[in-house]
Image (cartoon, helix red, strand yellow):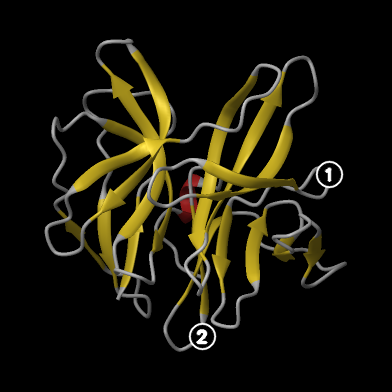
Amino acid sequence: TMLGIDARGTNCGLEWPPNFYLIEEESGTFEELTLSIEPPWRYCGTFGLSRRPRDGAFYTAGYEFDDIERNSFAVLIRIVPGTWNMTTVGRLTPPPGPRDTYVKIWALAFSPAGALYAVYELWTGTHPIRFVLARLNADTGAEEARVTLSPGILPLGIEFSSDGTLYGWSPSIGLLTINPATGAVTDVRPGVEDEQVISSIAFAADGTLYGFPGFMGSGSNEGWIY
């Protein structure tokens, strides 16, 4: 079964809850599933969707609006299969540092062994924005480790293959692999122009790799599957 969640950006609006889809990958037809969210405007800006091997629950990273603080915060979200109930696991807060803060969440994926990784942009004081790969605690959302990705490379989607290789997709170079221990990025097909509209990737059970356009791509390609 292939499932997808619709990214909505970082602006929390009452009319923009996440949309969740059951996708038929061979034809591109889909069925929208009803997510159980209380209150319905609680979440916005969901990025990435990955299934935890241990219990089959789905996880996404997004933004939650806090009524008391009147602000939205990056959080890790759990989605229960069947009921599709969405709950907050915890805020995605990096280890203490000089004015460290998240700028943007882009993607997340579970490894076959159950380790959870996320890609985001990190701003540190007056230093340039860094693109990082972080290992997160799936039970709390806390960051456990972090590596900086190769300079200038931002994967909009990441996914582990069954052999444990971490793949990503960047509009600048296309399909790539990432070393989770070092952050080193390798172009799978160097020197060849790649499709620019793909924003996320997913492996099917038979090992086929699919690509999906997102808000970074051309509007004329919305809904396509590659």
Measuring 30% from the left and 50% from the top, which residue is drawn there?
Answer: 78
Residue at mark 2: 207
Q: Is residue 63 left or right of residue 170?
A: left
The dot on residue 60 is: none
Cα separation between marks 1 and 2: 29 Å
Q: Is residue 102 left or right of residue 87?
A: right
Q: Is residue 172 left or right of residue 204?
A: right
In the image, 104 versus 138, the foreground residue is 138
Residue 209: image location, x then y, percent? 54, 76
**Above or below — where is 74 with respect to 98?**
below
Residue 2: image location, x then y, percent? 34, 71
For badge 1, the amino acid type reads Pro
Q: Label 1: few (<14), some or many (≥20) within 10 Å?
A: few
**Above or below — where is 114 with respect to 70?**
below
- Label 2 residue SS: loop
Residue at mark 1: 151
Task: State the quadrant of the N terminus.
Answer: bottom left
Q: Would you identify the image quadrant in which residue 77 lies?
A: top left
Q: Would you identify the image quadrant in which residue 71 lies?
A: top left
Q: Label 2: few (<14), some or many (≥20) within 10 Å?
A: few
Residue 150: image location, x then y, percent? 82, 50
Residue 44: image location, x then y, percent? 33, 33
- Label 1 residue SS: loop
Q: Would you identify the image quadrant in which residue 11 lies?
A: top left
For badge 2, the amino acid type reads Gly
Q: Earlier in the sequence, mark 1 or mark 2?
A: 1
Measuring 14% from the left and 52% from the top, which residue is drawn there?
Answer: 34
Whether the residues at callouts 1 and 2 have beta carbons within 8 Å, the answer is no
Measuring 52% from the left and 62% from the top, which residue is drawn there?
Answer: 115
Q: Is residue 98 left or right of residue 225?
A: right
Measuring 44% from the left and 79% from the top, which residue is drawn there?
Answer: 204
